[in-house]
Amino acid sequence: MLAVGPALATDASVQQTVIRIADATGEADCLINEPDHVVRSEVGAGVPVVRFDGVIVDTSDSKQLLASDLTRLDGTPQPEWSLIPLAWVPENGRPAFARLQGLLDGLNDSALRAFVGSVFADERVSEPFMCVPGSRAHHHAYDGGLLIHSVQVAETTAAAAALHSTPARECELAVVGALFHDIGKIRLYARSTVGMSPLQGTDPEALNLEVLAPALACLDAHWGEGAAALRSILAPARSYTHAPYLMTDLVRAMDRLSAGQDLRERAFQGAEGWQRYTSTDRGQLLARLTPKSVVSPQDWVGAII
């Protein structure tokens, strides 16, 4: 959140008001296409919390925010995920982004809300999470694929946990674990512009705990048992048949379901209605049930004979 600083300056020739804004990451000038008295009437006295919507522009010696709108807030702290710029999200990922906001707004546990907030407060994590692919050449292998896949897994995990009458706090923990079950992939596919160099030849699950280490350390202090369970969900799969925590099995099952759905949708795209089998680019055989009303070429041959 950007807080309005005390100094206001006005460019009378173009009827713009310039506000110096600052947060923990630095300072910037916010240019608003309204005269000074209009901005002051909107903002009011004192130093309120104001939300700006606009475009950040890098100039030779500073950053400027070209604001299209500003809204005075009531002072209630805004969750970090509500401040993620929509510009980071590819067009195809925006429905999932909207559902992500709803999922996170629905969290009631204060420790989990703080944990998720600290994850998304780090631009080196939140920006690539919104835009990188879910894989290089497997499921959700397109920009925004990681976001779409992660939200799908979180949603189906929440629905399945509710069907099994899972306690509310454990259900929320499972949703958070599902949302971040592939977050290590940002270290594989992140662009250098976010301050991280992409890695090669590393299991993404092995990177989950590395990416989330600072936030998990904070969760340890407020809910140690929850932090331990979350590590179990996020850690690389082991050889045991069932994980110590039931939610680990559930998240892994929903992960496979989301991946399989995407593979089938893309593999059967453009296929004839009667076609029951196809394969992925990797040669993996996929099958589907065809509607009873669909007549296959084999049926035509049988009818002729």
Image: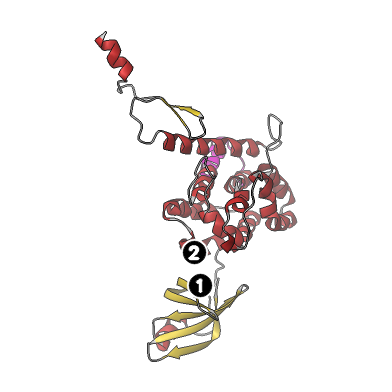
Q: Main secondary structure of the magenta part?
A: helix
Could you tell me if residue 53 is visible in this image?
no
Q: Which residues are magenta?
A: 155-169
- Residue 39's place in the image compared with 255, above or below, is below
User: Which residue occupies the extreme left position in the image?
Assistant: 304
Q: Amino acid at mark 2?
A: Pro
Which quadrant is home to the N terminus? bottom right
Q: Which mark is residue 74?
A: 1
Rendering coords of residue 172 (x, y %): 60, 47
Q: How many marks?
A: 2
Q: CA distance from mark 2 to mark 1?
A: 21 Å
Mark 2–mark 1 contact, CB under 8 Å?
no
Image point 43% across, 83% down: which residue? Answer: 39
Q: Secondary structure at mark 2?
A: loop
- Residue 176's place in the image compared with 8, above or below, is above
Image point 41% across, 88% down: which residue? Answer: 37
Q: Is residue 166 magenta?
A: yes
For marks 2 and 1 on the same chain, the one whose residue lies earlier in the sequence: 1
| 2 vs 1, front mark | 2
Q: Secondary structure at mark 1?
A: loop
Q: Which mark is residue 85?
A: 2
